[in-house]
Amino acid sequence: MKNMLPTLIKLVFRIKIYVFSFLTFISVSCNSVKWHTFQANNQRTGFVDRPEVRTPEIKWKTYIGIQGYLNNTIINSGDVYVGSSGNTHNQPDSLDGIYSIKKSTGKINWHFKTLTDANGVAFSKNKIYATSDDGYLRCISAGDGKEIWSIQREGELYSQPLVINNSVIIGDATGVILIIDINSGKIIKENKVASSNVRGGLSSDGENIYATFVEGVIACLDKNGNLKWKVKGEFNDQFGEDFYGIYASPTIYDNNLIVPFIRSTYYDTPAVYAYNKTNGELVWRATDNSGDTSGNVRSSVAIANGYIYYGSTYSNTLTRLNLADGILVNEYPMGKPTHPHWPSPVIANNMLYLGRHDGSFNAFDIKSNTLIWQLFIGDHNNTKQPKNKHTDWWNPQNGSVYATPSIDVDGTIYVGSGEGWLFAIRNKE
């Protein structure tokens, strides 16, 4: 037995090394997810394994013009990329376009001018793919900001670009889903699926493309753009003429497709449905046994630990639903009550980040269910929340947070405001 002891010690030590190496591999693999697209991945879950910001400070801020709800930031290597709605929403001006910003300093590397407001951006193979109100999908060199190719469609392009392998997929204003070769800009496939615009609403599980249209159509196409199924949301059964549309990107989790939608007033159930991603059958409608009322949901949701998270309208709350059945679990206050809400949440490990229409930017621990910190970024000169707590339709400072943030591998958060500033927020050093 004595002679076996050194061998056993060596074996245990070797096992420890293997286990450590495996855990390190898993950690690095999770942490190596690139934030190259809206909500970090094509499933639009908004979740990454990254360091949490618990003691925030603003590293830098840069003025690039209004960042609306479609102006998500993406990250690659040393740079941040984002679209801008310029000095004025829905009007052409000199600040409209796509920006590359050095993430260490906030210095603008280049600005590609679009004819009017720029919208979603995605990154692949050192190229930026960007949509705009001017109807163009553009492929831009990430290095120098020069256009490589572009195509123009009728009407505004609101869609978040979806990159799968060597294709970029968008939806246009007429209800057409397009698959485009990322190298040449040649349209490979056009499929008219609906009759209305795609307002951001594209996601993919790698095998299929899922699209939501303003009119309430939800569709599944294969990677070649062939329609597999399509359904019209059963909103009229409960909401009659108060159904206004779908602006969100659908979120894929397991075999479900989570679809938020818009309506005009209060109801006693949250505006979120789940569909079977295989056949489009309705799995559940969100329910609320608390007796409270719920408004519309313009944003996409984030998913972590078996729960769905999103910011609620007509309130100041973060809402949490059970992923399995859509039952409302809790609502947590953050910021000042406002009627609209646009930004989607994102999650780093156990920390959820969410902007609000009152101009606040919030960090919420989803493990302890605690609001950890709040920065007011609606006014770049003042990061303290105004004392006025009454419910407003609009932020009087015009500094609402519409945009969805991104999270870097070191935990740094990049988020834009309606006032026009892009912020980098990190842990205090």
Image: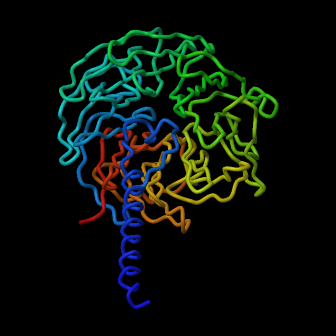
Q: Nearer the viewer, residue 118 or 76?
A: 76
Residue at image location 53% in from the left, 28% down from the top: 202
- Give the residue at the far bottom of this rendering: 2
Q: How many marks?
A: 0
Image coords of residue 118 (percent x, y): 36, 25
Q: Left or right: 307 with respect to 2? A: right
Q: Nearer the viewer, residue 17 or 416?
A: 17
The quarter holding residue 197 reads: top right
Image coords of residue 237 (percent x, y): 82, 30
From what the image shows, is residue 234 above or below residue 294? above
Residue at image location 59% in from the left, 11% down from the top: 192
Image coords of residue 238 (percent x, y): 80, 34
Residue at image location 67% in from the left, 25% down from the top: 216
Q: Left or right: 22 with respect to 246? A: left
Quadrant in which the C terminus is drawn: bottom left
Quadrant in which the N terminus is drawn: bottom left
The quarter holding residue 276 reads: top right
